[in-house]
Image: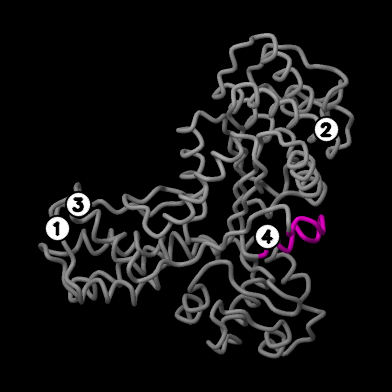
Amino acid sequence: MDPIRNPYAPGAGQRPPELAGRDEQLAAFDVVLERVSRGRPERSLVLTGLRGVGKTVLLNALRSAAVRKGWGTGKLEARPDQSLRRPLSSALHQAVRELGHPNADEVDHVLGVIRSFAERDAGADAKLKDKWSPGIATAAVRGRADSGDIEIDLVELLSDVGGLAADKGLGIGVFIDEMQDLGPDDISALCAACHELSQSGLPVIVVGAGLPHLPAVLSASKSYSERLFSYQRIDRLSRESADRALAAPAAEEDAEFEEAALAAMYDATGGYPYFIQAYGKAVWDLAPRAPITADDVAVAAPEAERELAVGFFGSRYDRATPGERDYLRAMADADSGLDPVGAVATSDVALVLGKKPQSLSPARDSLLKKGLIYSGERGRIAFTVPHFGRYLRTQG
């Protein structure tokens, strides 16, 4: 079939041609936007799930929904080695620009507060690379969001930005990807700021996306975070939604899948959105003609698996040290297949390796920091990537 017309799009955060299975989340977020704009109380939102389930895609779709409502929005990706101040300042600078407040003086004041917040950690002798240069010509507003206490500063900053949005009867949305990678102080400050803003009724919401243990990270920071956010677990697609993710783009290109082919695709992909796109692309490129058959899926499956082995699984495995790779392989060997997410006991991993659990703590902690594994409950760990254990077992 014509590869130029191939509609499938495997890629990190790349929106698929058919965003199937997320209608419920999109509809619920439209309600949140309307309620916040009207001054109604509403919780911020946290999306959690394994890698490859489409969290970033959904985060971007929610942001687009906010933009269509006239909101000011900004997005950032958290990194474990970076403070929240600079990326959040850039995101809020964009949000203020999108908002289009008509009073230039008020806008300049808020931009000055954003600059003050961003520059607080850069001293007078800081190198040029450590000074934030966001294109804001307005001078920093001293005495506002620059105390050095991130919790105080964040409340002041978001309050001022939220005031601009309230003037227009709109809102500000801050979208944070990889939220679990925020530092402990930043997580704590963000929770406190969301708590304060919800009490004041200002139209600012935070929409975060992260790995399955993100709720535990938030709860460890502030006990009230369980009531502060609306948590939505983003999982693999149902068979019906997976079929739609494949069939709808094909129909746009005057092609179709036979029912047996759709069943074979679901068996191969497990309903995970990234895998659906990867297998869809390979099957389209290798199928001789439409309709696509189960035999076409069988022929294309090895090509899709090779692509995933390099770009999805292999790139993550390569980040691990030799000792960490031993730990990952032991996790795969310890998986009995009984747990639906492949979680294993740390004691079982130690048993496979023939070592004491305490001696393996450095490898486990390093893998946690690299985002290759996560701990959903004490004493148990799981891969952040679906089917990663199966991949490791095939590598020998």
Which residue is under mark 3?
3
Amino acid type at mark 2: Asp
If you read the primary sequence from the N terminus, does the residue marked by circle 3 or circle 4 appear first? 3
If you read the primary sequence from the N terminus, does the residue marked by circle 1 or circle 3 appear first? 3
**Callout 3: 10 Å neighbours few (<14), some, many (20+)?**
few
| Boundaries of the magenta span | 213-226
Quarter of the image with the N terminus is bottom left
Identify which residue, 324 or 50, lies in the foreground: 50
The percent position of residue 206, horizontal first and vertical second, equals: 65, 43
Magenta segment: does it hold 9? no
Identify which residue, 287 or 44, lies in the foreground: 44
If you read the primary sequence from the N terminus, does the residue marked by circle 2 or circle 3 appear first? 3
Q: Determine which of the numbered discs, if any, sits on residue 200 in the image.
A: none
Which residue is under mark 1?
255
Gap in Å between the C-alphas at discs 2 and 3? 52 Å
- Residue at screen point 68% across, 60% down: 214
Identify which residue, 306 or 113, lies in the foreground: 113
If you read the primary sequence from the N terminus, does the residue marked by circle 2 or circle 4 appear first? 2
**Callout 2: 10 Å neighbours few (<14), some, many (20+)?**
many
Identify which residue, 24 or 338, lies in the foreground: 24
If you read the primary sequence from the N terminus, does the residue marked by circle 2 or circle 1 appear first? 2
Magenta segment: does it hold 215? yes
The percent position of residue 61, horizontal first and vertical second, equals: 46, 45
Amino acid type at mark 4: Leu
Gap in Å between the C-alphas at discs 2 and 1? 55 Å
Mark 3 vs mark 4: in front: 4
**Callout 1: 10 Å neighbours few (<14), some, many (20+)?**
some
Mark 2 vs mark 3: in front: 2
Amino acid type at mark 1: Ala
Question: In which quadrant of the rendered view does residue 175 lie?
Answer: top right
The percent position of residue 35, horizontal first and vertical second, equals: 58, 40
Which residue is under mark 2?
153
